[in-house]
């Protein structure tokens, strides 16, 4: 049984998806199925994480030996991602019951849970697979279900957000497919480890360079790296709150992991960062993302859009760390993947609580609500300070790691961008605080509003407390991030 | 042969990209179809390469590599799902917005938003002029 954990991790949510569809008459049961899928993947992730200390786990699908069959690999570099995705999935599942019940009509709620199961399958599969074509298939499973989830948002603009994301996402996925085609043409293999082996004697092959560019540009769309981020604000802003909580915390993070996996363990750091200028391009785009994302966040009128733009900037921090291609840089990137997932999950969750009570998350509508909804706004402030990077929050721990990695590498211009972006973060978090506490509540505010459901508040606060804990004691995420960096750079040296 | 495939993939991608720049949503769907086909053509072309086959073949024997054909089938099925979802979305958009032109969509949406804003403003003014809330229905 335990030998099959890597497969079970992915197959349980996959099996739960049609179950949700079959049981769609019983709305609570479909929610329970999704919760069970999330809990089972969390259990698998925790069990796997305790086992990888002795070395990477290789699982051969259907018993076919590695270069011929599809292989699942669990090692130091993907256990943090598995843990992040499954923890966030459990939190989103607890949160979803009341949130989806409020924002999506009853007939379509089971479809939301079906798509959430499929997204979870795709994200987990993308993380554990050791086969490049299998990675493309899981990428499309997660993307297609994500498009459908976004289209189920309350407002009719959600349709347009989903359509735009679908168009740009499909072009990105086709780029990845073309890149995989080129890599296959020059090597004749799809297994990641085998590809890395066969690529070593292909120095200077132009088709290989093309493969690297196609795969990375395609992944950049999914990661929402600066010039390809245009889909993200509308997609996260219009999706149902439970969905944006899950996606903002998990989906771009998995794409970033896949980028690391391709860069360090498939193409090799020597080819990607020394022969080709991916590191320099990454640092430049990361710096632009920090500035543009944070500046745009300051001008948003809707809290969910504000948070989404801030995600664009935070992804810049992660990409900057990884683009350094040093142990300290990659470790800082991973640390911020973990911390930002927790922080942004909590913030989107809190925004969903506001949507539930006010019917919108416009900053103007938040006027004077700080005293009416103390728990929600306390959550926003604590995690918002994490976005700014105030000590002793989790955001400070990862930003400190990133700044010291940048200093070691002498990347001064990026350092300036990090500081400027942090100041801008202070501005946009300050705008929320100003609206909530320093403005008078509108006269028409009904005195007896419905109380926020306990399950949703508990889910948000679980993430808030986790982020506070990670800020005080960073040994758990820090240890995971260091192990990930060691696994990537150790095996990846071309 | 490789050249023919390369040209085919390039033409498909180019035409698809051209269609994506159009205002009409249906044309954009057609562009996506062409672009995903160019990916499939690239995968097929990968089997014609001078690279090594996945499974060792006896020397001197010429066989077509079957693996990319399996990949192409998978990619086609994924493309089908994508197009189905796209068309469903376009259908919803046409029902809701009553147009399939991008700039008209934006105009309709802006109008809708302005309408909502006006209504909200009106509600607020009404409450301010009548703070006890005893307004006539």
Image (spheres, coloured by chain):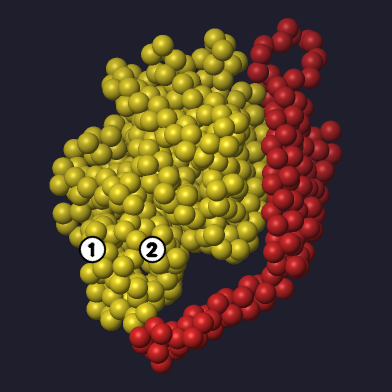
Chain colours: A yellow, B red
Q: Residue at 58% of width from left, 60% of height from top?
A: A158
Q: Nearer the viewer, residue A37 or A143?
A: A37
Q: Is residue A286 above or below residue A96?
A: below
Locate the N terminus of chain A and report the quarter of the image it occupies: top left
Locate the C terminus of chain A and report the quarter of the image it occupies: top left
Q: Nearer the viewer, residue A474 or A358?
A: A358
Q: Is residue B35 above or below residue A391?
A: above
Q: Residues within 10 Å of mark 1 (few under 14, many from 20)?
A: few
Asked if marks 2 and 1 touch (Cβ < 8 Å), the reply is: no
Q: Nearer the viewer, residue A322 or A268?
A: A322
Give coordinates of residue B11: x percent, y percent.
Answer: 81, 49
Question: Residue A357 got which mark?
Answer: 2
- Check disc 1 and report the residue beneath it: A374
Which chain's residue wears label 2?
A: A
Give coordinates of residue B58: x percent, y percent.
Answer: 73, 7
> In terms of sequence position, does the residue under pointer 2 or pointer 1 come before the other?
2
For marks 2 and 1, give the one nearer the viewer. Answer: 2
Q: Secondary structure at mark 1?
A: helix
Give coordinates of residue B43: x percent, y percent.
Answer: 72, 33
Q: Residue at 75% of width from left, 68% of height from top?
A: B98
Q: Secondary structure at mark 2?
A: helix
């Amino acid at each position: 049984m335990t030998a099959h954990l890597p497969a079970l991790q992915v197959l349980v949510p996959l099996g739960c998806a049609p179950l949700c569809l079959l049981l769609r008459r019983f709305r609570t049961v479909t929610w329970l199925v999704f919760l069970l899928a999330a809990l089972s993947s969390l259990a698998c992730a925790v069990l796997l994480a305790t086992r990888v200390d002795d070395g990477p786990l290789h699982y051969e699908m259907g018993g076919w030996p590695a270069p011929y069959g599809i292989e699942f690999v669990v090692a130091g570099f993907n256990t943090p991602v598995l843990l992040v995705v499954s923890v966030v999935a459990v939190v989103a599942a607890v949160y979803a019951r009341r949130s989806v019940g409020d924002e999506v009509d009853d007939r379509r709620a089971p479809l939301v849970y079906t798509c959430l199961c499929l997204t979870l399958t795709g994200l987990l599969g993308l993380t554990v697979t050791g086969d490049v074509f299998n990675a493309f298939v899981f990428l499309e499973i997660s993307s297609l279900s994500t498009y459908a989830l976004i289209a189920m948002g309350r407002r009719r603009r959600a349709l347009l957000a989903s359509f735009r994301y679908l168009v740009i996402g499909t072009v990105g996925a086709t780029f990845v497919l073309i890149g995989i085609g080129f890599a296959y043409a020059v090597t004749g293999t799809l297994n990641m480890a085998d590809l890395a082996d066969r690529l070593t004697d292909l120095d200077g092959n132009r088709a290989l360079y093309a493969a690297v560019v196609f795969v990375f540009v395609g992944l950049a769309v999914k990661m929402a790296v600066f010039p390809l981020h245009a889909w993200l604000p509308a997609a996260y802003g219009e999706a149902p709150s439970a969905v944006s909580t899950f996606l903002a915390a998990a989906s771009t993070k998995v794409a970033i992991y896949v980028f690391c996996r391709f860069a360090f363990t498939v193409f090799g750091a020597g080819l990607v960062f020394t022969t080709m200028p991916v590191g320099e391009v990454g640092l430049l785009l990361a710096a632009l993302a920090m500035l543009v994302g944070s500046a745009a966040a300051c001008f948003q009128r809707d809290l969910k859009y504000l948070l989404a733009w801030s995600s664009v900037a935070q992804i810049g921090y992660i990409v900057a760390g990884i683009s350094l291609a040093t142990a300290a840089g990659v470790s800082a990137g991973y640390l911020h993947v973990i911390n930002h997932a927790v922080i942004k999950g909590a913030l989107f969750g809190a925004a969903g609580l506001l949507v539930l009570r006010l019917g919108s998350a416009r900053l103007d509508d938040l006027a004077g609500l700080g005293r009416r909804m103390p728990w929600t706004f306390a959550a926003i402030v604590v995690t918002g300070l994490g976005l700014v990077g105030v000590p002793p929050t989790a955001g400070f721990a990862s930003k400190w790691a990133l700044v010291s990695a940048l200093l070691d590498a002498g990347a001064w211009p990026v350092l300036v961008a990090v500081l400027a972006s942090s100041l801008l973060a202070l501005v946009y978090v300050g705008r929320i605080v100003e609206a909530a506490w320093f403005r008078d509540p509108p006269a028409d505010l009904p005195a007896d509003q419905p109380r926020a459901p306990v399950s949703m508040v508990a889910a948000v606060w679980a993430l808030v407390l986790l982020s506070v804990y990670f800020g005080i004691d960073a040994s758990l995420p820090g240890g995971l991030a260091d192990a990930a960096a060691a696994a990537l750079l150790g095996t990846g040296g071309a | 042969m490789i050249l023919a495939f390369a040209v085919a993939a390039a033409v498909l991608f180019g035409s698809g990209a051209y269609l994506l720049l159009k205002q009409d949503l249906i044309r954009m769907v057609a562009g996506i179809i062409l672009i995903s086909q160019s990916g499939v053509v690239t995968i097929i072309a990968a089997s014609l390469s001078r690279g090594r086959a996945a499974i060792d073949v006896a020397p001197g024997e010429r066989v077509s590599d079957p693996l990319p054909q399996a990949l192409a089938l998978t990619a086609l099925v994924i493309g089908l799902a994508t197009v189905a979802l796209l068309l469903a979305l376009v259908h919803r958009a046409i029902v809701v917005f009553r147009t399939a032109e991008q700039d008209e969509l934006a105009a309709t949406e802006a109008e809708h938003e302005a309408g909502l804003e006006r209504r909200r403003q009106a509600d607020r003014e009404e409450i301010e002029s009548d703070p006890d809330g005893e307004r006539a229905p």
